[in-house]
Amino acid sequence: MIELIPAIDIIDGQCVRLTKGDYDQKTVYNDSPVEVAKGFEALGFKRLHVVDLDGAKSKHIVNSQVLSRISAETRLTVDFGGGIKTDEDIEKAFAAGAAMVTVGSIAVTNPQLFIGWLEKYGAERMILGADVRQGKISINGWKEDSSEELLPFLRKYVDAGVKNVLCTEISKDGTLAGPAIDLYRQVMDAYPGLHLIASGGVSSKDDILALDAAGIPAVVFGKAIYEGRINLREIVKL
């Protein structure tokens, strides 16, 4: 069965969601990401995806204290992303309790640094973020589009030992319009051994079942939870 990973996105210490990565289209859902995380754990979830949106925009980690509290007050396996640009940032994330980190922009702008982290911390603790807009990898909180195309971008890092990839179709993110299943199938066809985490557009249990039927190993979803589109007690039993 597909691995289910609820998401918490943080701005100003609050649990929020954006639409298509647009900071001007922000909805605040809860003032306490820690309480939201505890709620996921109480329902039986084991994993959590935490995104420091302030960090992504500022190009350095901002909300490490929230990560520390979630890590200290739950037993969730947390992967953390947003603003990890330097050795200091990645050390701060792990020190704050992240079991894994998601790194995207640095893999585009400084490949040798990313590969160094991969070698130092190990492939199991590193998730390559591949955020896609119109076929190209987007960076720096989705504020910039690179010239990197998705499948060749993934190839060089799969060859370097990457095992985990979080792929977000930006045009779908926060829209509740359904996931980009064809895109994820392309990735899995090209790299069948990859632990691909699909992200963006999930609106219902049916979307999750469709991803599972397509052979996608894992899914991150957030807005559908906060908008009441998904019964968490039901899907955690899938």
Image (cartoon, rainbow, N blue to C red):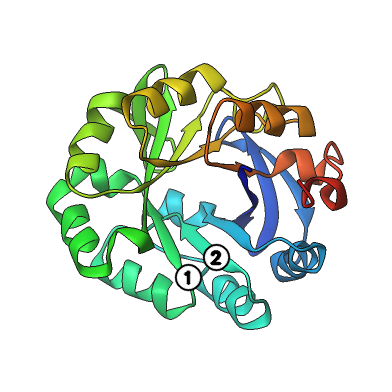
User: Dots 1 and 2: beta carbons under 8 Å?
Assistant: yes
Q: Dot 2 surroundings within 10 Å: few (below 14), some, or many (20 or more)?
A: many
Find residue 221 and report its horizontal and vertical position in percent: 66, 42
Q: CA distance from mark 1 to mark 2?
A: 5 Å
> Which sits in the foreground, 159 or 179?
159
Find residue 20 and report its horizontal and vertical position in percent: 58, 29
Say left or right for 26 vs 42.
left
Q: Is residue 143 above or below residue 148?
A: below
Say which mark, if any, is on residue 98: 1
Find residue 143 and report its horizontal and vertical position in percent: 41, 35
> Which sits in the foreground, 154 or 135?
154
Say which mark, if any, is on residue 235: none
The amino acid pointed to by label 2 is Val
Q: Is residue 76 above or below residue 234?
A: below
The single residue placed furthest to the bottom in the displayed view is 72
Q: Residue at x 27, y 64 (%)?
A: 122
Say left or right for 8 vs 32.
left
> Which tag, 1 or 2, sits closer to the chain's start?
2
- For the N terminus, give its image quadrant: top right
Res. 102 visible in picture: yes
The amino acid pointed to by label 1 is Ala
| Residue at image mark 2 | 78
The single residue placed furthest to the left in the displayed view is 112
